[in-house]
């Protein structure tokens, strides 16, 4: 009788161990996906400094400027 109780107790232990390990793996995946990295864009300021700006605050016009416009924009 004690041998059967021992086997039953061992099976319960292994079963709960499996449940907690799978739960831990799923929980760690959810935590990793919950923290997206903010996307930043490097831009050049008018006085020639390089800064990083959050991409969410930019208005994207998708219009390219010409070399003449760029050269007239930079202060020397």
Image (cartoon, helix red, strand yellow):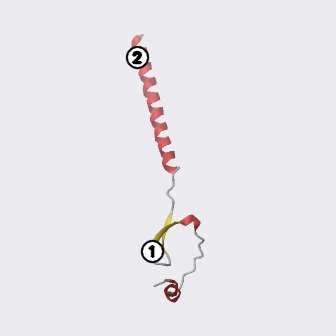
Viewer-side residue, 8 vs 68: 68
Q: Residues within 10 Å of mark 1 (few under 14, many from 20)?
A: few
Q: Nearer the viewer, mark 2 or mark 1?
A: 1
Quadrant containing the C terminus is bottom left
Residue lying furthest top: 1
Residue lying furthest bottom: 68
Q: Is residue 33 left or right of residue 7?
A: right
Establish if 57 lies above or below 28. below
Residue 10, position in %: x, y?
A: 41, 22
Nearer-N-terminus badge (2/1): 2
The count of marks equals: 2
Tell me what residue is drawn at x 51 percent, y 87 percent: 72
Residue 46, position in %: x, y?
A: 50, 78
Q: CA distance from mark 2 to mark 1?
A: 72 Å
Tell me what residue is drawn at x 44 percent, y 30 percent: 17
Helix, strand or loop at label 2? It is helix
Helix, strand or loop at label 1? It is loop
Q: Label 2: which residue?
A: 6
Find residue 50 and report its image quarter. Answer: bottom left
The disc placed on residue 26 is: none
Tell me what residue is drawn at x 51 percent, y 51 percent: 35
Viewer-side residue, 6 vs 51: 51
The disc placed on residue 49 is: 1
Q: Residues within 10 Å of mark 2 (few under 14, many from 20)?
A: few
Tell me what residue is drawn at x 39 percent, y 14 percent: 3
Viewer-side residue, 11 vs 34: 34
Residue 14, position in %: x, y?
A: 42, 27
Establish if 16 lies above or below 1. below
């Amino acid at each position: 009788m004690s041998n059967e109780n021992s086997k039953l107790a061992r099976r319960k232990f292994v079963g709960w161990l499996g449940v907690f390990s799978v739960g831990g793996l799923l929980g760690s995946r959810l935590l990793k996906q919950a923290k997206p990295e903010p996307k930043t864009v490097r831009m050049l300021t008018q006085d020639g400094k390089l800064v990083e700006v959050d991409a969410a605050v930019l208005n994207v016009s998708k219009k390219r400027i010409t070399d003449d416009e760029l050269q007239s924009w930079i202060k020397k």
